[in-house]
Amino acid sequence: MNDELSDYPMLYRLCHPCEGRGPGTYRNLLARRVRWSYNGDMPGSKTYCVYIMASRKNGTLYVGVTGNLVQRVMRHKDGAVPGFTERYGVHRLVYHESFRHIDDAILREKRLKKWKRHWKIRLIERTNPEWRDLYDSLVG
């Protein structure tokens, strides 16, 4: 495996909580990752984000996708998004990941929404064990 592909095992573990299941999935992920790398070098490429918001540590979770993470989280925090997040007080950004293709971001969002709750919690705690609000680190 060359240096460019050396982060794939970590990416695979983050994307799949049941490590080692679904042998075809890993191959597809590698192909998609190469496409991300290629398109990331193009000027003006847009980034799409899948994010998880929480009401508090181990509280209510919300999974979403957006083309502008800072603006979207701000709308959640201001209560400008009526519905689930407003009703349950889900205002803390606890996890996010970026994609260069909207199709990949939407696919990831749909998969995360089907995950069991403890898988999502494990994903959050791998990168944010204190469940800090990551919004402040995005805006500066």
Image (cartoon, grey):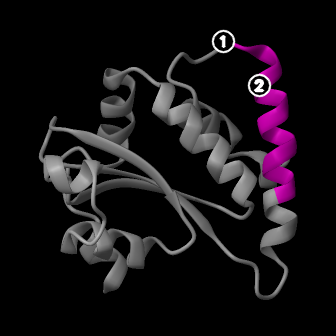
How far apart marks 2 and 1 lie (CA) works out to 8 Å
The magenta segment is 22-35
Give the SS element for disc 1: loop
Residue 110: name its quadrant: top right
Of the pair 79 and 66, the residue shown nearer to us: 79
Question: Which secondary structure type mostly characterizes the magenta part of the structure?
Answer: helix
Where is residue 134 drawn, in percent x and y?
28, 65
Query: Does residue 1 show up?
Result: no
Please state which amino acid type lies under the numbered disc 1.
Answer: Arg
Of the pair 15 and 11, the residue shown nearer to us: 15
Is the residue under label 1 in contact with that under label 2 (CB below 8 Å)? yes
Q: Which of the numbered marks, if any, corresponds to residue 21?
A: 1
Where is residue 124 drawn, in percent x and y?
33, 41
Where is residue 51 drawn, in percent x and y?
43, 54
Q: Is residue 58 left or right of residue 107?
A: left
| Residue identifier under label 2 | 25
Where is residue 100 drawn, in percent x and y?
72, 64
Task: Give the quarter of the figure containing the C terminus.
Answer: bottom left
Of the pair 1 and 34, the residue shown nearer to us: 34
Residue 46: name its quadrant: bottom right
